[in-house]
Image (cartoon, coloured by chain):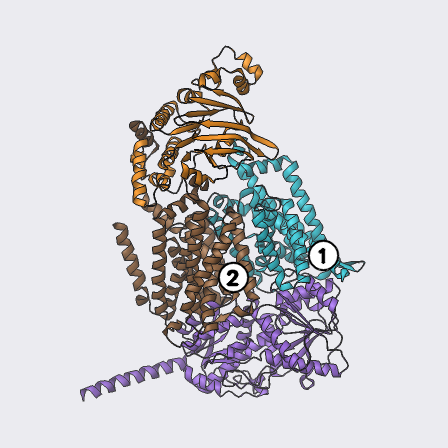
């Protein structure tokens, strides 16, 4: 088992943002985390990466307990992530941004640069290598974050809304990129609002509501689960919307 | 290559300065520019590159100054012997206070460093061994050349220049190594840097210790040229602020920023004091204050950043379209 | 023959240049550098000394028959240099030893001053005079009291002012006389800041008194520029010393007076060590709360018509402030320096140095209450001495001790407000 | 002994209230805008000079001086905001230090240029002398400053927590862009915050002038105290500044009396650093 989170709970004061959530991840999975705003999926995500300390619970990575490890130590083990709001290194060029990731596996500058270039090649940003990162727009930044994360040579890549704010064509390009990454043998966890993305990528889905896991299974199973529909729309609206497909309701292709 | 050419020209100018401007005051002014450039460049490592605004760097400055003067005052040794001792002491202090304070974010870090500096000043003021409020004096009549007490500013000038070059060399080496990359990344987003495996706390601590060691060298040199250190001139918070202002004014986080800042501020201060100070109406500081305000208001990145930007404008800038075009092309 | 010819022409040229230089110096002015704090915490000193030096220059550069035998008053200019006028080039030391030294260098090498005076704070006098020593330029100090200044083996440093050991002796003798007059003086407290001035003076006083068999009962040290001194005053109030010796700069002196009033504490005798208690702005701010305070001083107004009274009036007209001890000591140093230059008849540093070494001024030739001015080989004025003045009836200090120069009798006990 | 100790503590509390008074303005702009105002001490100094000028020209005490200082400094706050802060607050923290430090020098030495370097002082009995309660002496001027400190703290706290203006200001502090989307002009709110902060500081200066000396460099002495108070209390927390101010006042008084006055600042800084270790967000700051 690659990643195994058991009974993860994160409380802010008396408020439990995540309440005893568990998840397992096998090599080759693409796990989708979905749920309405404020459902706790981002908090859960940050508990896995080490950005937030757990209130209780345990996280195992390749059977090692990493619950107490700092984010940088988890990165060294092979856990990489992107951010919902891109955290680009503004003062650097695109290439240098990716080199930060590459430096994890080599202390040498030339080696890091070579690796960063090959990652840029892979994600199709080679020509922008020397552009200042701050000149990028949202799509560029999102892609750059993925490139950076790839440069750390991860076993698991966690994508936090990597497609939010992209146009449909850009989303399609991003999906192609994620597929490509998956084909190269990297296991993925994706938090995503856009159902289309989850439907076409995820092999398994976990649904959060009010800090708790309310459903899990294949994308199709989950989207037809009444509890999930109720969570997204409220019970009354769920009845009123009975005639629509669940995908549309959840902000699928119609948006 | 063009950059190298410019660097060589600049270096030639700096080497030639005291031979062109030959009066003792001009030469000393040149030496002081280099001295403050050393201190500000050292500060730049942690304040500019790592973005940790230390306002208490005078602690390290003071440990160098006191070590140099102490070597002479207590052991009748050359002040030069004090330099390594000062470095060791400064690096130790940095290691001890860096651990807890570098965890603090933004303003809290700055405040903590101010408190540490004030604490050091107060303790030294009450320590007889360090001369208490009277301070420690160096050799006024030199016994030999190693007493570093010269009439002419020329020996100081070239010594300071050599050390400035070493400091900038270390800085350059650091910035082009993994550590430098990590520091800049931590400055922009510590969270993202850590997610990519950058050991943020350790990297910052190393930078802090490196910066502390170099700052203490500057302090030792300062004590040598003035032949004196007391709690105000060796540990006064205003020295820290002055160093910080020079780095910020020239361009924090840029290799030559602190030098540019020192080359502007030191002469500005000394010359405006020479012209206006004797009138006794405080006009020096009105002018000085106004200039600082204007620069902060209109050129917050520092003067060198402005020059770099004007320089970069001549290059083509990639646009948003080219990015998405490229992306679609590649996928 | 050709070689000696060249030498001859060369030396003639050198001599004529030298002579021309000399002549130029005589027809022009004698430049003296003055380094003082003109910004920062001690800026008020710089403001006062400028007014005082203006008055001194007026006396030196213009005929002032009303001053009688006072040196340099009769002629317009320095008689020894063909009535050359004296000019002061001021520099602001910004309260920093580093700036003070830079400015000393500038005055010597750029402004070509023939001598220096200043620089108030002992630490700055230390660094500034080190430069003068290196460049072989006379440095005459009128007001810095740190002991070590004259212990450095310097050849170009001269100090006119009395120093801590002198004050300690004055205090001891004064208190002995007061005890003889029936006052209690055995239980002494010293209140001082921990600056170089406060700590060293307090130390010296404690040592001298201990040698004489009167150990100091209570030592209250505090950090200068305090925001509050209540706990120090309460310590005094509790320990009830007979005499409180105050060694404070102006800011703290004002706070102490205000706090003593607020806490209703009056020591039987308050003896201040000059500095803050002599600052005219202290007297304006807190004089009404410090009635009966004794103060160490070497300045006293003297009878009407005396040179000191004339100078004091000129100063008051110029500045609007009463002459105080610090300012007067600085002014005295300038007179001593100019008198030596006049006697040297030259602006050559070595000749001025020689003249300074030979200085021998009598009490009627100086404006201070010293026994005269005469330097030992360390450069310290061995005839420097002090007297005790008291704040009586409002905002004026009057000399009360020793009896020989007393204008009024000392009033006991301390009245406060 | 115990009697003196009570007096020491009472004195410390009154002193602490004064610290709190001149720190409340600093904590407001620091917490709301994340701006470090190195010129804060010099705002206090300006308030003191206003009080002095009012007394010399009109012969009035703090009854006239204090409101006038509040008003003038509030105006200055708005001018400083639009002229300087608005632009530098978007920049790096270094630019803020640079800008406000330059402003400090500019203000300090403009006053120096105008009024000279002499120490000035207001007459002692301007605010009704000193009370003697069972042998404990309380200066009316300090008591007034202490009471005003409490009122200002309370008032600012109410303003921020109970009024629309306050919640708008807090919304801007939380997220300026989001606030703008809700129809709040961040610029206006921040200018008001500066006016309030500078006004409160001016008020503090005018009151402190009744028992302290007045000199252009006085801001340096007071400024650093304000910085420690605000850090200890937590940036942005007005009640925090009050508690921290009182705490520092009492610690200073007690350590000055029991250990020795030269050590009181050492005690304060050491405690402050120790405190930062365990609770970096300050007494009442948010994490």
Is D233 left or right of A2, judged from the image as shown?
right
Q: Which chain is cyan?
A: D
Locate residue B12, reporting x and y percent.
28, 60
In the rendered image, the residue lying farthest to the top is: A243
Please state the total of marks drawn on the protein image: 2
Image colour assigned to chain C: purple
Locate residue B274, reporting x and y percent.
44, 66
> Which residue, given by chain and number where applicable, does mark 2 sit on?
B236
Q: Which chain is brown?
A: B
| Position of the C terminus of chain C by quadrant | bottom right
Q: Nearer the viewer, residue B76 or A94?
A: B76
> Which residue, given by chain and number where applicable, does mark 1 sit on?
D9
Image colour assigned to chain A: orange
Q: Residue at x 18, y 89 (%)?
A: C1
Residue D203 appears in view: no
Locate residue A163, reporting x and y percent.
41, 27
């Amino acid at each position: 088992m690659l990643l195994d989170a058991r009974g993860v709970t994160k409380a802010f004061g008396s408020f439990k943002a995540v309440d005893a959530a568990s998840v397992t991840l096998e090599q080759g999975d693409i796990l989708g985390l979905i749920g309405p705003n404020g459902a706790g999926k981002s908090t859960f995500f940050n508990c896995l990466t080490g950005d937030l300390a757990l209130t209780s619970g345990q996280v195992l990575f390749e059977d090692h307990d990493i619950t107490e490890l700092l984010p940088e130590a988890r990165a060294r083990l092979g856990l990489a992530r992107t951010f919902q709001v891109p955290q680009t290194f503004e003062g650097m060029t695109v290439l240098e941004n990716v080199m930060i990731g590459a430096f994890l596996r080599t202390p040498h500058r030339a080696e890091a640069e070579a690796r960063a270039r090959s990652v840029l090649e892979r994600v199709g940003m080679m020509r922008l290598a020397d552009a200042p990162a701050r000149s990028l727009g949202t799509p560029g930044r999102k892609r750059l974050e993925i490139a950076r994360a790839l440069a750390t040579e991860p076993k698991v890549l966690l994508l936090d809304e990597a497609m939010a704010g992209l146009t449909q064509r850009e989303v399609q390009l991003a999906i192609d990129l994620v597929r490509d990454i998956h084909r190269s043998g990297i296991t993925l966890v994706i938090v995503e609002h856009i159902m289309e993305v989850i439907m076409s990528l995820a092999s398994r889905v976990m649904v959060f509501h009010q800090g708790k896991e309310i459903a899990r299974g294949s994308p199709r199973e989950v989207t037809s689960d009444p509890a999930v529909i109720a969570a997204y729309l409220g019970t009354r609206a769920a009845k009123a919307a009975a005639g629509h497909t669940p995908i549309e309701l959840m902000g699928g292709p119609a948006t | 290559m063009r950059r190298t050419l410019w660097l060589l020209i600049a270096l030639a100018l700096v080497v030639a300065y005291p031979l062109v401007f030959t009066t003792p005051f001009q030469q000393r002014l040149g030496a002081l520019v280099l001295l403050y450039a050393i201190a500000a460049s050292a500060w730049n490592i942690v304040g500019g590159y790592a973005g940790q605004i230390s306002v208490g760097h005078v602690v390290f400055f003071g440990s160098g100054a006191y070590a140099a003067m102490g070597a002479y005052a207590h052991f009748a040794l050359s002040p030069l012997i004090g330099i390594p001792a000062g470095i060791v002491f400064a690096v130790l202090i940095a290691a001890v206070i860096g651990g807890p304070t570098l965890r603090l974010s933004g303003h809290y870090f700055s405040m903590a460093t101010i408190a540490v500096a004030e604490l050091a000043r107060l303790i030294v003021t009450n320590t007889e061994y360090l001369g208490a409020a009277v301070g420690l004096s160096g050799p006024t009549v030199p016994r030999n050349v190693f007493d570093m007490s010269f009439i002419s500013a020329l020996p100081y000038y070239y010594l300071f220049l050599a050390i400035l070059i070493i400091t900038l060399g270390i800085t350059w080496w650091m910035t082009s190594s993994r550590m430098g990359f990590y520091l800049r990344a931590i400055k922009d987003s510590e969270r993202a840097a850590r997610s990519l495996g950058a050991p943020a706390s350790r990297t910052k601590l190393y930078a802090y210790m490196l910066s502390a060691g170099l700052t203490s060298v500057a302090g030792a040199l300062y004590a040598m040229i003035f032949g004196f250190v007391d709690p105000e001139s060796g540990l006064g918070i205003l020295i820290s602020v002055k160093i910080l202002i020079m780095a910020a004014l020239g361009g924090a986080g840029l290799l030559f920023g602190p030098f540019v800042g020192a080359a502007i501020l030191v002469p500005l201060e000394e010359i405006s004091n020479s012209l206006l100070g004797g009138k006794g109406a405080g006009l020096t500081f009105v002018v000085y204050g106004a200039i600082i305000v204007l620069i902060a208001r209109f050129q917050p990145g520092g003067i060198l950043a402005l020059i770099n930007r004007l320089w970069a404008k001549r290059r083509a800038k990639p646009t948003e379209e080219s990015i998405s075009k490229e992306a679609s092309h590649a996928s | 023959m050709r070689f000696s010819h060249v030498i001859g022409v060369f030396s003639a040229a050198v001599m004529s240049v030298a002579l021309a230089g000399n002549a130029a110096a005589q027809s022009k002015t004698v430049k003296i550098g003055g380094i003082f704090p003109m910004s920062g915490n001690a800026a008020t000193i710089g403001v006062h000394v400028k007014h005082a030096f203006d008055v001194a220059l007026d006396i030196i550069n213009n005929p002032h028959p009303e001053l009688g035998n006072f040196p340099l008053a009769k002629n317009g200019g320095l008689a020894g240099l063909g009535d050359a006028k004296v000019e002061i080039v001021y520099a602001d030391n910004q309260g920093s030893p580093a700036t003070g030294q830079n400015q000393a260098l500038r005055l010597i090498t750029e402004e070509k001053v023939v001598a220096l005076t200043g620089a108030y704070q002992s630490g700055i006098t230390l660094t500034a005079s080190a430069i003068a020593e290196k460049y072989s330029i006379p440095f005459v100090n009128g007001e810095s009291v740190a002991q070590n200044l004259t212990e450095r083996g310097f050849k170009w440093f001269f100090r006119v002012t009395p120093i801590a050991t002198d004050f300690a002796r004055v205090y001891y003798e004064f208190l002995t006389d007061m005890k003889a007059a029936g006052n209690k003086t055995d239980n002494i407290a010293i209140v001082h800041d921990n600056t170089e001035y406060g700590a060293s003076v307090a130390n010296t006083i404690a040592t001298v008194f201990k040698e004489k068999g009167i150990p100091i009962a209570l030592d209250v040290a505090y950090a200068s520029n305090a925001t509050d001194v209540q706990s120090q005053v309460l310590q005094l109030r509790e320990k009830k010393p007979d005499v409180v010796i105050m060694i404070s700069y102006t800011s703290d002196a004002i706070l102490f007076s205000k706090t003593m009033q607020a806490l209703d504490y009056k020591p039987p005798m308050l003896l201040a060590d000059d500095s803050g208690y002599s600052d005219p702005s202290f007297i304006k701010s807190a004089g009404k709360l410090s009635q009966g305070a004794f103060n160490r001083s070497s300045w006293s107004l003297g009878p009407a018509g005396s040179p000191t009274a004339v100078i004091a009036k000129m100063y008051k007209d110029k500045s609007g402030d009463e002459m105080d001890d610090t300012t007067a000591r600085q002014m005295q140093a300038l007179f001593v320096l100019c008198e030596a230059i006049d006697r040297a008849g030259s602006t050559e540093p070595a000749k001025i140095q020689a003249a300074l070494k030979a200085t021998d001024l009598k009490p009627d030739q100086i404006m201070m209450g010293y026994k005269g001015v005469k330097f030992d080989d360390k450069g310290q004025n061995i005839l420097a001495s002090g007297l005790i003045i008291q704040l009586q009836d409002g905002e004026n200090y009057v000399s009360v001790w020793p009896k020989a120069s007393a204008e009024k009798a000392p009033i006991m006990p301390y009245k406060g407000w | 002994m115990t009697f003196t100790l009570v007096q020491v503590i009472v004195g410390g509390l009154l002193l602490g209230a004064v610290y709190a008074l001149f720190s409340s303005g600093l904590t407001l702009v620091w917490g709301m805008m994340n701006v470090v105002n190195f010129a804060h001490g010099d705002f206090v100094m300006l308030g003191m000079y206003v009080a002095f000028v009012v007394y010399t020209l009109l012969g009035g005490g703090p009854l006239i001086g204090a409101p006038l200082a509040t008003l003038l400094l509030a105006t200055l706050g708005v001018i400083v905001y639009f002229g300087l802060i608005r632009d530098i607050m978007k920049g790096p923290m270094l630019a803020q230090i640079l800008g406000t430090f330059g402003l400090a020098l500019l203000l300090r030495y403009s006053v120096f240029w105008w009024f000279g370097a002499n120490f000035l002082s207001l007459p002692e009995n301007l605010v009704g002398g000193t009370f003697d309660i069972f042998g404990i002496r309380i200066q009316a001027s300090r008591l007034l400053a202490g009471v005003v400190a409490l009122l200002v703290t309370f008032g600012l706290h109410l303003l921020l927590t109970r009024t629309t203006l306050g919640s708008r200001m807090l919304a801007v502090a939380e997220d300026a862009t989001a606030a703008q989307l809700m129809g709040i002009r961040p610029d206006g709110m921040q200018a008001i915050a500066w006016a309030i902060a500078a006004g409160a500081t001016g008020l503090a200066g005018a009151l402190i002038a009744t028992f302290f000396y007045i000199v252009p460099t006085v801001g340096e002495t007071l400024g650093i105290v304000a910085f420690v108070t605000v850090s200890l209390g937590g940036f942005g927390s007005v009640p925090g500044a009050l508690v921290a101010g009182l705490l520092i006042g009492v610690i200073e008084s007690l350590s000055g009396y029991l250990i020795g006055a030269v050590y009181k600042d050492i005690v304060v800084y050491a405690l402050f650093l120790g405190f930062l270790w365990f609770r970096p967000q300050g007494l009442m700051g948010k994490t």
